[in-house]
Amino acid sequence: MKEEIKNLAKALTNRFVAHPWHGIEIGKNAPAIVNAFIEITPADAVKYEIDKASGFIMVDRPQKLSNHMPCLYGFIPKTYCDKAVAEFAREKTGRTDIDGDLDPLDICVISEREFNHANILCEAKVIGGFRMLDGGEADDKIIAVLKGDQAYGEMNEISEMPKLVIDRVRHFFLTYKDLDGAAKNVEITHVYGREEAYEVIQKATEDYASKFGNADEALVEAFLGAFVNKLS
């Protein structure tokens, strides 16, 4: 029965749009250049995120404050933040109370261009990241530049990026929950470079493989989740 569902799910995926998390490859040149699925642009006053079961973009909540996301924001397909990512964060921070947030690995893509809608896929060159902890969970933010970007595309390391640009991104994540005091639970312990970002991506792909096994199994799980949601 599961094999039949798998074949049906694959047939539907081939006919329609691929699931952004499970149906899109991380990129043939990963971890240096990865595919990034963009959920939010700087123009958005609403926080959108992927519905894991269906793959559709859903409204999470209106942004509570006046500050907007300062870059393109989304996730890296076929990644997952669980035990390997958490263990790496514990190793780097010396803390023992960190778990994975059980979400795809987040990515911030910096570009000089304005984008008027999200729900898009782009190639992003990884230059570094933030080790962010949210409520004791590893919630790393990979920092990348849009491949081919005329202003930032030649940068290879986060240290090459103007400090003000990185400070804006950092400030957003440290303050976007301020209204209800939840920002007290958010901290950025490290700003790290390209090589460490590569390691975080590798750990997140390991977690994905441990959780889902392979793309077919993940696709079946997503398909069944959407089907159950439809029935309920």
Image (cartoon, helix red, strand yellow):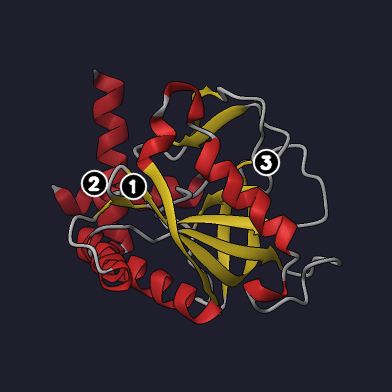
- Residue type at mark 2: give it: Ile
Element under disc 3: loop
Label annotation for residue 32: none
Q: Position of residue 137 (x, y in %)?
A: 29, 50
Q: Nearer the viewer, residue 29 or 67?
A: 67
Instruction: Answer whether labels 2 and 3 touch (C-beta < 8 Å).
Output: no
Q: Identify the residue under disc 1.
A: 9
Q: Identify the residue under disc 3.
A: 41
Residue 74 falls left or right of residue 148: left
Q: Residues within 10 Å of mark 2 (few under 14, many from 20)?
A: some
Element under disc 1: helix
Residue appearing at x 30%, y 59% in the figure = 216
Residue 151 falls left or right of residue 173: right
Q: Identify the residue under disc 2.
A: 5
Element under disc 2: helix
Q: Residues within 10 Å of mark 1 (few under 14, many from 20)?
A: some
Instruction: Answer whether labels 1 and 2 touch (C-beta < 8 Å).
Output: yes
Alpha-carbon span between mark 3 and mark 1: 30 Å
Q: Quadrant of residue 46?
A: top right
Vertical position of residue 1 compared to residue 76: above or below: above
Disc 3 versus disc 1: nearer the observer: 3
- Residue type at mark 1: give it: Ala
Residue appearing at x 23%, y 64% in the figure = 213
Disc 2 versus disc 3: nearer the observer: 3
Of callouts 3 and 1, the N-terminal one:
1
Residue 7 visible (yes or no)? no
- Residue type at mark 3: give it: Thr
Q: Nearer the viewer, residue 87 or 50?
A: 87
Residue at the outermost right position: 150
Residue appearing at x 72%, y 68% in the figure = 161
Quadrant in which the C terminus appears: top left
Q: Position of residue 114 (x, y in %)?
A: 81, 45
